[in-house]
Image: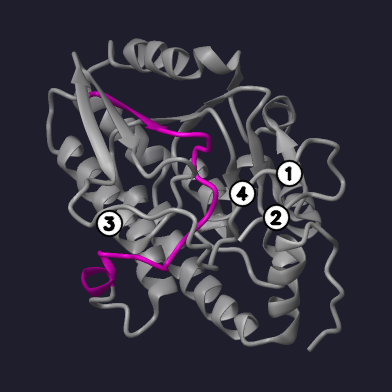
Amino acid sequence: MTSADSTSAQPAEPDAGSLESNGAETAAAATPAVALERVGHVALVELRRPPHNFLSIGLVAELARALEDLDADVDIRCVVLAAKGKSFCAGADFSTDSGTAEGLEGAGDSPVLALYDGAARLFDIGLPVIAAVHGAAIGGGLGLALAANLRVTCPEARFSANFARLGIHHGFGLSVTLPELVGPARAARILFTARRFNGEEAAELGLADLCVPRDQVRQTALDLAREIAEGAPLALRAINRTLRLGMADRVREATRREAAEQEKLLATADALEGIVAMSERRPGNFTGR
């Protein structure tokens, strides 16, 4: 599925909504979705489902496991979360998910809730995490970016919670992370308008912390991580857990409501119209049904 922001003069990008399968990104089940590299006291974790790194239950579970393993390694003091391809993460895709059976354990029959249960695990991590957002962070991809402590981006990046234009509810814990980061009023504007913001606008809003040239995003994130890694590993984890005290539980509670609202709205005519309208690059003709 693709989408475009009618308020933006930028060229359309292949954005995914937070729920719909687009089938544009497939990979062999045996190929790891997440790669890991250790450089001194810093770990680089890279999403490898290019070009758009669509979220899936399996990818989120793999990412959570990688971060949990790093969190248990006292030699690692900071993580950079980056992505290979055009986008940082352009949404979610359930079309070819090798991790579905595992992810559904404890989540009933809901793939949405299974994805969000995996997302909540990201907030239990004590290690500081910096997201290197070099491209689109759309829908659930925005949720993933906001799960990090800090974000480095570039002018070419796009940040959007495009759920309202799809006729569905937002997810991936954005009910918690977005107002916490930018305040309730700005969070409401981002969610209600479903606008795209470029990297410079994202930094002004508070969605990103640093905006640098695109070819410097990853290196800038690594440099910041190395600076953070000069701190003591136990102290860094303790500080982060205090700063995020209770956030994982709040995200778990919020995502249950988000998932329920999403599944309810997916059954509406407006959701079908929103999906078609996004694919056709036009505003939705919504009827409230």
> Would residue 137 be found to the left or right of residue 101 on screen?
right
Front tag of 2 and 3: 2
Q: Earlier in the sequence, mark 2 or mark 3?
A: 2
Highlighted range, magenta: 77-103
Q: Earlier in the sequence, mark 2 or mark 1?
A: 2
Nearer to me, 219 or 23: 23
The circle on residue 104 is none
Q: Earlier in the sequence, mark 4 or mark 1?
A: 1
Q: Report the predominant secondary structure element of the magenta stretch.
A: loop
SS at circle 1: loop
The circle on residue 12 is 1
**What is the C-alpha distance between the residues marked 2 and 1?**
7 Å
Determine the residue positioned at 69% across, 32% down: 202
Front tag of 3 and 4: 3
Nearer to me, 80 or 33: 33
**What is the C-alpha distance between the residues marked 4 and 1?**
24 Å
Q: Which residue is mark 2?
A: 3
**What is the C-alpha distance between the residues marked 4 and 2?**
21 Å
> Would residue 256 be found to the left or right of residue 160 on screen?
left
**What is the C-alpha distance between the residues marked 2 and 3?**
26 Å
SS at circle 3: helix
